[in-house]
Image (tube, coloured by chain):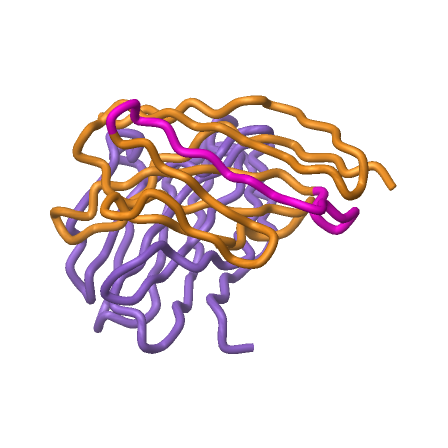
Chain colours: A purple, B orange
């Protein structure tokens, strides 16, 4: 499969724990996006990388959230001190120079 | 920031009929408008997109129209089939700064009745 991949696909964690998700974009895509989707809603933008540079962050992204894209390849999204409100599907998308993103399958986070 | 409104939230059509989903956006600087299809439990899939220098784009049974003056854009699906049943999302982006970050509508659940 040469599409966007994400791991893990599901994560259950207790409130207060830290979690980290990984996204592997389509190899020739230099743009990478993280979105969050809750039930019955459209995806909400979290952050954007062009190569290794994090160029935009949503106000939704509290200081408990941090994202990296070392070497401009895969990306990680870490949530510290998880809260129940963090439960959602976390989607990664990658895109070429122009155009919309191609989404990965997502990581479903459940915070108990 | 951008705000995208999408209507209707649910839509049921008979197989073979047409379906139309409408979106409005608030930021006149938005210039790129993709549509995504999301089946239950699956990732959003890009089905068609349109840029602000084009008024209409068609791909087989799917077409998108854009009215920049009114800040409206619509998805038209003709000859609907049961496999078209899914949630459809419109989105808007201002690509001027180089990012294609998207603001999504809340989605339309389309049911095609055989």
B60 or B33, nearer to the observer: B60
- In the rendered image, the residue lying farthest to the left is B97
Tell me residue A63's x, y (percent).
25, 35
Whether residue A102 can be seen here = yes
B46 or A29, nearer to the observer: B46
Specify whether residue B78 is painted magenta: yes
Tell me residue B12's x, y (percent).
74, 28
Tell me residue A11's x, y (percent).
58, 49
Range of the magenta residues? B69-85
Total numbered labels: 0
Specify whether residue A29 is painted magenta: no
The residue that appears at 42% across and 54% down in the rendered structure is: A92
Quadrant holding the N terminus of chain A: bottom right
Tell me residue B69's x, y (percent).
24, 26
Q: Is residue A104 left or right of residue B17?
A: left
Q: Is residue B27 left or right of residue B19?
A: left
The image quadrant of residue A57 is: top left
- In the rendered image, the residue lying farthest to the right is B114
A59 or B103, nearer to the observer: B103
Quadrant holding the C terminus of chain A: top right
Q: Is residue A70 left or right of residue A91?
A: left
The residue that appears at 39% across and 45% down in the rendered structure is: B56
B81 or B18, nearer to the observer: B18
- In the rendered image, the vertical position of residue A107 relative to residue B114, given as above or below: below
The image quadrant of residue B92 is: top left
Whether residue A66 can be seen here = no
The residue that appears at 74% across and 35% down in the rendered structure is: B111
Q: Is residue B13 left or right of residue A69?
A: right
- In the rendered image, the vertical position of residue A111 relative to residue A34, given as above or below: above
- In the rendered image, the vertical position of residue A3 relative to residue A102, given as above or below: below
């Amino acid at each position: 499969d040469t599409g966007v991949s994400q791991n893990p696909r599901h994560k259950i964690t207790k409130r207060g724990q830290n979690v980290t998700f990984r996204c592997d974009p389509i190899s020739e895509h230099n743009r990478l996006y993280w979105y969050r989707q809750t039930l019955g809603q459209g995806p909400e933008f979290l952050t954007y990388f062009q190569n290794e540079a994090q160029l935009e962050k949503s106000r939704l992204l509290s200081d408990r959230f941090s994202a990296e894209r070392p070497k401009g390849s895969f990306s990680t999204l870490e949530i510290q001190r998880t809260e129940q409100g963090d439960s959602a599907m976390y989607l990664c998308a990658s895109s070429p120079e122009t155009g919309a993103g191609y989404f990965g399958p997502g990581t479903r986070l459940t915070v108990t | 920031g951008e705000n995208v409104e999408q209507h209707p939230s649910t839509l049921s059509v008979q197989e073979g009929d047409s379906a139309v989903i409408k979106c409005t956006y608030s930021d006149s600087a938005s210039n790129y408008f993709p549509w995504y299809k999301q089946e239950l439990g699956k990732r959003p899939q890009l089905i068609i997109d349109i840029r602000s220098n084009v008024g209409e784009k068609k791909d087989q049974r799917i077409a998108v129209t854009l009215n920049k003056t009114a800040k409206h854009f619509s998805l038209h699906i003709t000859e609907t089939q049961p496999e078209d049943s899914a949630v459809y999302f419109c989105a808007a982006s201002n690509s001027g700064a180089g990012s294609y970050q998207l603001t999504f509508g809340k989605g339309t659940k389309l049911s095609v009745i055989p």
